[in-house]
């Protein structure tokens, strides 16, 4: 199985209440979810936060296995933390988008055209290139959109990495 990332709006007050939910329960109680191929094989939240020196208050669960035996790593921004960090995420993705795109490009080794990273950050359209900087940009936009909805719905946001991924 190739790696993927699923972003889910979840009713999580804190990491403990989140960890008590079964995998299927996350989706059943969610505000929606989307799954994207993870062609870069990178943990996009870690890539994004290292590139931008951001701290989004992410809780990373222990490595686990899903029902099919596939490696699973889950990350969460709980409801309370989401309210605190949403302005920072908004600034990184929208207000300071150019600086964020440049930071992602630099962290990725400068190999990717800046306009491709900027486009992914603006649109959230998932790239097919497999480039980590582009994927991190698209992830950041998707995360922002999920976070806005989650805040309105009084929820948190989680994302699940499935398959082999590296920080």
Image (cartoon, rainbow, N blue to C red):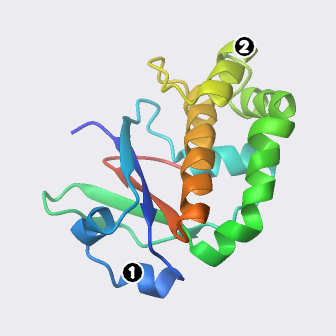
| Count of numbered circles on the image | 2
Of labels 1 and 2, earlier in sequence is 1
| Residue 83 found in image quarter | bottom right
Residue 10 image offset from top left, x and y in percent? 43, 67
Above or below residue 17? Residue 126 is: above
In this rendered view, identify the residue nearer to me: 63 or 92. Answer: 92
Position of residue 154 measured from the top left corner of the image (x, y, whole percent): 55, 71
The N terminus, quarter of image? top left
| Relative image position of residue 124 (x, y in whole percent) | 56, 30
Question: Could you classify mark 1 by the number of other residues whose Cα lies within 10 Å: few (under 14), some (14-19), or many (20 or more)?
Answer: some
Q: Residue at x 43, y 85 (%)?
A: 17
**CA gap, disc 1 to disc 2?**
39 Å
The residue drawn where x is 16% and y is 59% is: 69
Q: Is residue 54 visible?
A: no
Q: Is residue 67 left or right of residue 117?
A: left
Between 79 and 99, the one lying in front of the other is 79
Residue 29 x/y as whole percent:
32, 69
Kindly indicate whether the residue at mark 2 contacts the one at mark 1 (C-beta within 8 angstroms).
Answer: no
**Residue placed under numbered mark 1 in the picture:** 19
Disc 2 designates what residue? 115
Q: Residue furthest front?
A: 152
Dot label at residue 92: none
In the structure shown, which secondary structural element does the residue marked by tag 1 occupy?
A: helix
Q: Secondary structure at mark 2?
A: helix
| Residue shown at 32% from the left, 59% from the top | 72
């Amino acid at each position: 199985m190739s790696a993927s990332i699923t972003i889910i709006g979840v009713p999580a007050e804190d990491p403990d209440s989140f960890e008590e939910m079964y995998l299927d329960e996350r989706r059943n109680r969610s505000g929606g979810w989307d799954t994207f191929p993870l062609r870069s094989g990178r943990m996009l939240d870690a890539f994004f936060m290292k590139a931008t020196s951001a701290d989004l208050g992410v809780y990373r669960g222990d490595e686990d296995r899903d029902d099919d035996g596939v490696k699973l790593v889950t990350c969460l921004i709980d409801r309370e933390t989401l309210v605190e960090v949403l302005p920072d995420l908004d600034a990184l993705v929208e207000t300071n988008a150019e600086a964020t795109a440049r930071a992602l490009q630099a962290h990725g080794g400068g190999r990717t055209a800046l306009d491709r990273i900027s486009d992914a950050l603006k649109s959230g359209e998932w790239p097919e290139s497999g480039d980590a900087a582009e994927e991190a940009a698209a992830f950041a936009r998707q995360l922002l959109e999920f976070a806005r909805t989650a805040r309105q719905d009084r929820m948190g946001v989680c994302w699940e990495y499935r398959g082999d991924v590296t920080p």
